[in-house]
Image (cartoon, rainbow, N blue to C red):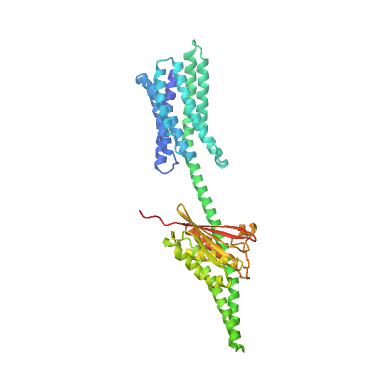
Amino acid sequence: MAQHVLSLQIILCLSYLTNALLSVLLASSGLKFKGAWWWVLAQSLMALGTLSDALAQFLPAWLPLIFGNSAYAMASIFYMHAVWNFRFKKPFFYWLYGITAIQIGSFVLAYYQAYVIRAAVFSAWMSIGPLCTAALLLWKVERRFRLANILTALPFLVLGLASVSRLFVLRAVSVQGELQTVSEQNVWYTAGAILLSTIMLFGYFMMSSIQSLQILSKKDEEIQARNQELTIASKNKDLFFAIIAHDIRGPISGAARYVRKNLFGKLSGLEDKYNEVKTLASSLERTNEYLEKLLWWSRAQLQDWSPSTKDIDLAPSLDHAIEMLKMRSDMKDITFRIKGAQALQIHADPECIQLILSNLLGNALKYSHPGREIMITIQPEDAYCKLCIQDQGIGMNKAILDRLFHIEDKISMLGTRKESGNGLGLILAKSLAERNDCSIRLDSKEGIGTKAWLTIPLAKRKE
């Protein structure tokens, strides 16, 4: 019986040595997974343990019982480490390697005990490690990888359960039949280990394949997400140009009518000419405004375009935006009042900030009732400047507010003096704000007014 065990141990040793060498070759060739080298180390320790068992008759008695058994037990932790790296993104608990000191200590103490106790200590450690490894492989597995993980966990599960059963057998061994029973069990235990060693190499291939599938799956998801983004961007672009084309048509046709009327008509009075020139100027201004938005929108949609951010003073940008709206505010007898710290430096693209402020202030002016006031509050907060533009206008209900920043939901709201609007300016302002690490938020109540919050990064203080 002892000869059978020795022969099986030699076969087992060769099997694990082959596994270790093949694992090294596979990992070196690039066919590996995250944690593959820990798996190689585990295979090498298993080979070392089986080698000490195979050469036990040529070695001091303590070497295979302490050193060899410790190699087996440590291999279990290396397997756990490999599987942990393979399955989870969190760092491995390196303090678990401290258990090896306890394992070695237990083998040293067991060395002076009866064979049954020595075997029981070894079986206990060989139950815990493999079962923990199997549990890690089976914990919260995606449905599509479940079968592969079960097959990879199978040898560890069988080895752990076999070690548990061996514990019960050792406990039931009678003193009289101890050697015969244990020897028979060792034959089966070693023969089973040979079979499991071949499946463990199969586990290496399974984990490598699973990781390759996961990488491909992630790439597919990224491609699909990218394609979806491109589809949405393409639709938004088409919609934007359709809206712009529709809105530009009105001012240009108005200008064309004026030219035809003045060139081919019989108008001679100064008042008539003044009104026509005024109409032409208004049409051209609106056309210019739409073309300006078209230019900025096309810029904002370019993936490689980035704003030229720098430290700028907030006050001049705000004053310039208000000055551009002076004629319109005078016509509606609306005043702008600024409250808070104006003498702030912000970090943004000057042209982008100018356009954002002009749009937000222009909207507040458009929807404010004549004779009212627009309050601009400036408040520094941490590394940002919070600017609130509050009007006393017609406001909006929640349904309109929720759709305001969606280009596919064209919202046309007339101002308090029937000023036209299509919502594109606000969408463009939000897009440019996000490119400048800014944010825009609106609060509004129908019949009361709207608050527009613009958050801008402050310039970093120079030490």
Report the front residue among 381 and 225: 381
Residue 431: x and y in percent read: 52, 60
Q: Nearer the viewer, residue 299 or 368?
A: 368
Q: Is residue 308 left or right of residue 447?
A: left
Q: From what the image shows, is residue 328 above or below residue 438? A: below
Residue at 34% from the left image edge and 19% from the top image edge = 60
Residue 416, percent from left and from top: 63, 68
Looking at the picture, how far across and down is residue 278, in whole percent?
57, 79
Q: Residue at x 39, y 20 (%)?
A: 108
Examine the image and state in which quarter residue 244 appears.
bottom right
Between 292 and 167, the one nearer to me in the picture: 292
Indicate the position of residue 197 as horizontal and vertical percent values: 46, 31
Q: Is residue 213 above or below residue 49?
A: below
214 relative position to 416: left or right:
left
In the image, 34 versus 57, the foreground residue is 34
Q: How many marks?
A: 0
Is there any visible trace of residue 18 in the rendered image?
Answer: no
Residue 389 can be seen, yes or no: yes
- Please give left or right for residue 447 compared with residue 337 in the image: right
444 relative to 295, above or below: above
